[in-house]
Amino acid sequence: MIFTISYNLRNAIAKGLIVGIITTIIYLLVVVFTTPNLSPIAAINAALKMNSMIIFGLAVGVGMQIFLSSYSKNLGCRINKKRNGILGSSGSTAVSSFLSFFSLVPLGCCGSWLLLLSLLPSVFGSTFAVVLIQYSKPLSYLGLSIVLGFTVVSALRLRKELKERKEVATKNKGLNNRSEFENSYRVDQI
Amino acid sequence: MILGILSISAVSFVILTYGSSTTSINNNIFFPFFVTMSVSGEEKHTVPLDQIVSGGPPPDGIPSIDSPKFVSVADAEKFLHDFDFVAGLNINGDIRAYPLQILVWHEIVNDNVGGIPVAVTYCPLCFTNQVFSRNINGSVVEFGTSGKLYNSNLVMYDRLSKSLWSQALGEGIVGKYAGIKLERIPFDVAYWKEWKQLYPNTKVLSRETGSTRPYGADPYGDYYTSPEVLFPISNHDNRLGLKEIVIGLENDRIYRAYNIQDIEEKKVINDEINNKFIALFSWHPSMVRVFDSAVNGTNLTFAFDVKNNLFVDKQTGSRWNFEGVSIDGPYKGRQLTRLPFDEGFWFEWVAFHPQTELYSQ
């Protein structure tokens, strides 16, 4: 059996894959840059050990978002009409990545992330900073689940849109058949 | 959009953190400006320079506390819990506690205790606490964080000569003071609950440090209790778990580590390192004191008197308290000499002292 996939689908898959891979690369580059006491390989290994779920989860979530948005665009659908989906998903990705970076503190004493965390109270206030640090892990997973949630919502919207289109197409086909019959009947009478 | 946010976050972080950095040694091939203090190969050094690596922040990026303020036990109760760790000092009757929840954000406190200029230091990654005299060859110096690491341990610098100092070795490693040992001062690591009970009039380091930090939140999370470390260790030794806490002692290049759990269980360990007789006392959980067991030329051997919660020497039957003072018997009023020691995770002790012996009875 030979599967043929349309140009639109192929194009959307490629875009999704590329963006997913780029997201992972950017994440790992941030890890390498902010952990200069470790060799890049050791830093990446450590990040993968600690945050593999977040790293791959975000890559999948972001890649899927791009795939769905690209595929629907090519089909002429608009699944994120108000751009809230894209904005929410991007925001959650950024927040989730940022919070997951907090777990890099134990990679080096006096490290970059310790310094960054120490600046949090001047941005968010002490109480909120304490909450962010204490609950960074569950919060980063919450961010990831929001990203994946947006992806699922986008997929459902696309499915609904495609279903509606199919119904309209079937209806139109029925109407076309009927008008063709009526036209031919008229021609016969003449 | 997503990539934009991620990239902007990364770039802003780098600018925010490293904007003011200068040049120096560096092991990161991607970020040549990830550097802090300059160290040239021509400077005097006692450890390989390529093993001193940048942790990221510039010197004093993690700020030391240079004008510490202190509060009473009652005020400290507002932010300390019973099972919070404190580093405790008692010098000439001046008793002070330094909560690790504050030290974790500063790593060094430059203080004067009982008339002695001291630096109270803490490296969270290795769980090494050390208290040093700040008097070097007659000059009083102030220490700051260099932003560098040696064997994953804090590297300090002194603001007088800019020499680099290894916290774990207590020794200058680069610069004018390379090879100079800092005088170590005996201290305690104790739960707040025990410390305030022992010293109800203790002063406690205030959260008013001059810096706004999220005190109370530990950025290292479950690092202390998780069994693994995620950075390379220069010398693996499986005799103990990586993060078991040990008391490390040295006498004339003979190194010996004691598992803190063993001391807690036995309450007292009598030992000898290279002809020096010592006694390790543990009266409270996580709190160990080491004494020179020689009194009047006699090396005393101690046992724990469970009934009275005291230590008794087998030679004279004198009873001694946790301060090392005899409160009863022929030696009443005598004071044992306290000895400084290293306390930290096993992986750190063996990284610095690969030839160490491990105490076992």
Image (spheres, coloured by chain):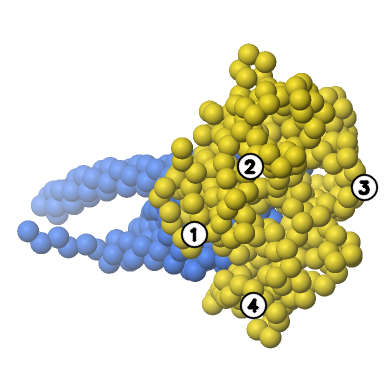
For marks 2 and 1 on the same chain, the one whose residue lies earlier in the sequence = 2
Quadrant occupied by the N terminus of chain B: bottom right
Looking at the image, which residue sits at the far right? B115
10 Å crowding of disc 3: few (<14), some (14-19), many (20+) = few
Marks 4 and 2 close (CB-CB < 8 Å) = no
The residue identified by callout 2 is: B278
Q: Quick check: A72 left or right of B205?
A: left
Amino acid type for the residue under numbered disc 3? Gly
Q: Give the CA distance from mark 4 to mark 2.
A: 42 Å
Under tag 1, what secondary structure?
Answer: loop
> What is the distance, in whole Å, between disc 3 and disc 1 at their CAs?
37 Å
Residue A129, given in percent of the width and then of the height, sits at 70, 42
Q: Is residue B290 above or below residue B232?
A: above
In the picture, the disc for residue B355 is 1
Determine whether the residue tagged by mark 4 lies in a helix, strand or loop.
loop
| Residue count near mark 4 (Cα–Cα under 10 Å), binned few <14, some 14–19, many ≥20 | many
Q: Is residue A87 something that shows in the picture?
A: no
Tag 4: residue type?
Ile
Q: Are marks 3 and 4 in contact (CB under 8 Å)?
A: no
- Chain of the residue where label 2 is placed in the rendered structure: B
Q: Which marked residue is nearer to the observer: mark 2 or mark 3?
A: 2
Q: Amino acid at mark 2?
A: Ile
Q: Are marks 3 and 1 on the same chain?
A: yes
Q: Earlier in the sequence, mark 2 or mark 3?
A: 3
Q: Nearer the viewer, mark 4 or mark 2?
A: 2
Task: Say the numbered circle drawn on residue A141.
Answer: none
Q: Residue furthest bottom?
A: B42
Name the residue tied to disc 3.
B115
Q: Colour of chain A?
A: blue
Q: Is residue B334 visible?
A: yes
